Image (cartoon, rainbow, N blue to C red):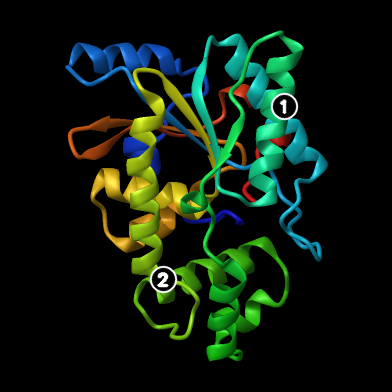
Amino acid sequence: MPRTFNRIPALAYRVLAYRDSFDADHACDALQADGVPAMSLLLVRHGQASYGAADYDNLSERGRVQSRRLGDWLARGGHRFESVVVGGMRRHRQTAEGVAEAFVAQGLPLPEVVADAGFAEFDHEAVFGAYLARDPEHPIAAASRSGQPRDVAAMLQAALLAWANDELPGLPESWAAFGQRVQSAGERLEALAGDGEVLVLSSGGVISRLAQIALDVPNARAVELNLSLRNSALSEFHPHGSRLRMGSWNALPHLHGERDLWTYY
């Protein structure tokens, strides 16, 4: 999704964002010292998809580069996964393929990809379409027809908030049902990880709902977290008791110094 160009959430910068030079393994060691299991769940938003094209669910060339760079960074950084999970969208699987290419190039094993529909993105066409159809002449809806990123981002935020507030009836999945689906999917990861790491390639809506659960923040913050996520960005979670704990958010260590590859949509 497009970023909120003028409203990057203060929460993400103040509490969650971490430097591109962050070493996830050191973070895991620190958590172990506090008695938290070594298990690490790495949630990755897919590489850049085909925004503005007839078929969004297909990585752009830039998205493929992001995915291969991610795989190279993970492989060189010593990440060895017990499981690799995708949400079932084509862009999720294509991102996983880019990661796998990098592991193969370095002669390293990577588990066979497992699809889990719990990590599939919500039906964004249904949500945004319902919002636009509700009042097509509303200033936010009308402005979004310009196609300008700032105008589209404003519409996305308004539509997601309307969905979260149950103001868009007749959708195939309610906000509450989506959250429950994502929470159940997150709970399944612990069994896959053992004492190691699990890599999940999914979408911004899914990852932001897991962050909402981990941080116990309101729906409006979950929407902001969603719109702040960059393509191929890494977010780290750790199981802690009956809930997830967040270790890091929205990082691009594999694209350090390459701002032309930092994308939000």
Residue 145's spot in the image, x, y percent? Answer: 70, 77
Residue 25's spot in the image, x, y percent? Answer: 41, 13
Q: Which residue: 48% across, 55% down?
A: 205
Asked whether 264 or 80 is in front, the reply is 80
50 is higher (above) or lower (below) than 161: above
Q: Quadrant of residue 108?
A: top right
Secondary structure of the residue carrying tag 2 is helix
**Labels in figure, total:** 2
Q: Is residue 10 visible?
A: no
Which mark, by number, is residue 161?
A: 2
Residue 130's spot in the image, x, y percent? Answer: 55, 82
Residue 149's spot in the image, x, y percent? Answer: 66, 61
Horizontal placement of 244 versus 241: left or right?
Answer: right
159 is higher (above) or lower (below) than 203: below
Secondary structure of the residue carrying tag 1 is helix
Q: CA distance from mark 2 to mark 1?
A: 34 Å
Q: Amino acid at mark 2?
A: Leu
Of tags 2 and 1, which is closer to the observer? 1
Q: Quadrant of residue 37?
A: top left
Q: Quadrant of residue 66?
A: top right
Which residue position is annotated with label 1?
68
Q: Quadrant of the N terminus?
A: bottom right
Label 1 environment density (alpha carbons within 10 Å; few <14, some 14–19, many ≥20)? many
Q: Which residue: 67% across, 37% down?
A: 95
